[in-house]
Image (tube, rainbow, N blue to C red):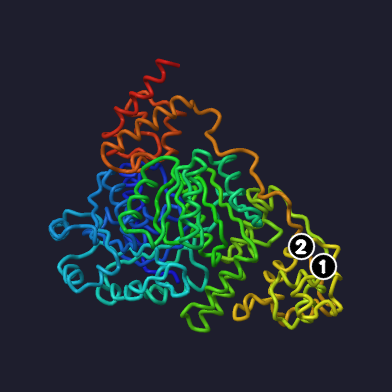
Amino acid sequence: MQQTHTQLDHSAEALETLQHVFGYPAFRAPQQEIISALLNAEDALVIMPTGGGKSLCYQIPALLRTGCAIVVSPLIALMQDQVEALQQLGVRAAFLNSSLNPDDARSIEQDWLDDRLDLLYVAPERLLQARMLALLDQVSPALFAIDEAHCVSQWGHDFREDYLQLSVLHERFPGVPRIALTATADARTRQEIAERLKLTDAHHFLVSFDRPNICYRIALKDNPRGQLLRFLRDEHDKDAGIVYCLSRKRVDETARWLVEQGFNALPYHAGLPTETRAEHQRRFLREDAVIIVATIAFGMGIDKPDVRFVAHLDLPKTVEAYYQETGRAGRDGQAADAWLVYGLQDVIMLRQMLDQSQGSDAYKREEQHRLNAMLGLCEVTTCRRQALLAYFDEKREEPCGNCDSCLNPVATWDGTEAAQMALSAVYRTGQRFGVNHLIDVLRGSENDKIFQNEHHYLPTFGVGKALDTRQWKSVYRQLVARGYLSVDMARFGALCLQESARGVLRGEVEVLLRQDPKASTARRTTKTALPEHIDVGLWEALRECRRQLAEDQGIPPYIIFHDRTLQLICEQRPKNVTEFAAISGVGDRKRDKYAEAFLRVVNNSEGTG
């Protein structure tokens, strides 16, 4: 719902701040509208994809409004990353969290009270403490920014109970504008964020969920380690990336195995000591070509721009989780891969975890719907990007040309008769058996379990010999994905008929099934690489200069300049400070601090060219 009262035009001062502080020539839509709303003391709810420039939407108003902006952030690592980046720009930023000793925390509080800060990052738990609220009463905050706002949703994948209490900001400080931001929220989650944070009357900005630089690729598990190894060696041999696994045990095993294969891989999950997790995250952020193997405990708020791939060795629980996790790839806008392998066993395992959860029946039903949607995305035979965007109520007219379905179109076949056989086998065996036994019945296998249950007398025994075991597994997987069958974990993974199966068994519904490719995964035609016109020698020299400057300051290299800025330096070869300052990503502070060092590298390259 849009507010209608007269707005003041702050566009000129906002643009000047963007150019001189952050070094970017122009805003992306709708950054300027969001910034204007906050500068006019109005609230905003912003749904914007990762890499879309969410932070600028509150950082620029924080610099232009009177007072210090309070940014609610859920993770210590994210706070530290953003504060270091702002300090590089000359912005007075700090954070308050449990990593600080009491003296440092008091010093930051005093800077805040003395108006020596532009932005202060705090965790929701700390913000809601009586001491913090009392300090807020002593100052007039410029604004409140609630980052990762999907944490407020109990249906979301990163729910944080403390976020539920953040409506106190509206009640206690009604005159201070608020902005809530997240990259991932379906219609239900967006509504819940607005209601819980009292933002139903705020400006709502819903930016396209599309990340066109990410190539989405999903394949069946067929020796998943071998599939992953081929993917990494063929396409991402020297790249930074994330590999997600469902269990801590698999994380540890996969990380060790990748090290044995020659990769710089580190494990990350909640079972590791805090110090180990922090060190592994630090190395991932500050070193090149590090692969983090992780559970979902890793990733929220990770701001590393040059993650070239996100791989899943297990099926994510929801489309939201998949989108959020894959969104950590390619934040710099350069080509990146979202790679996933899955199988029916993943569905069975996730269903078992859901059945064992402490959630209510309503919660379990909702999560089952979301799991079905994730499986449906895997099984779709048309453009994956169209299907992914449709989940978030966004329509894309044309296929994307940058997913496996577009690059290697999937063949389909009339599986109606096979589906009838498969469903009949479930019915005639009493809906008490798992997929392997059902396939044995269909293929006429003569084993002890078949004879013990007298299933060799059934009409369906041996009727499916025309399909091999792999093909029957594909049929059952797709019938589960489409809701004709469900998995009963109380009976050890038994398949059960759903109401919708009636139409198939009666011959009233035609069933078109995807023909699973024999290749392990679709491949892109080219490996991620620099543009052909880039001078590789200059590129590497600029990277080494950046690495050394970052090491001297104890910060990640990308905080100095993103790869895109280094590419522009390679292309434009600035000869003086004025030309250097004109490059996107070079603000006034970075011009003064780094022009001499990088110009020296460019000039040396000219001399040896």
The residue lying at 63 percent from left, 55 percent from top is 218
Q: For numbered disc 1, what is the local secondary structure?
A: loop
Residue in the foreground of this view, choosing between 332 and 4: 332
Q: Cβ–Cβ below 8 Å for labels 1 and 2?
A: yes
Measured from the top left, where is residue 353 in percent x and y? 52, 73
Q: Which mark is residue 469?
A: 2
From the viewer's perspective, tell me whether residue 112 is left or right of residue 346: left
The residue lying at 47 percent from left, 60 percent from top is 249
Q: For numbered disc 2, what is the local secondary structure?
A: helix
Report, in whole angstroms, how far the alpha carbon at label 1 lies from the one at label 2: 8 Å
Residue 429 position (above or below residue 110): below
**Amino acid type at mark 2:** Thr
Pointer 1: residues within 10 angstroms few (<14), some, or many (20+)?
many
Which of the 4 image quadrants contains residue 114?
bottom left
From the viewer's perspective, tell me whether residue 464 is left or right of residue 44: right
Residue 378 position (above or below residue 133): above
Residue in the foreground of this view, choosing between 6 and 100: 100
Image quadrant holding the N terminus, namely: bottom left
Measured from the top left, where is residue 607 in percent x and y? 40, 15
Residue 547, visible in the rendered structure: yes
**Amino acid type at mark 1:** Arg
Q: Which mark is residue 152?
A: none
Residue 58 position (above or below residue 360): above
Sequence-wise first label, 1 or 2: 1
Q: Which mark is residue 443?
A: 1
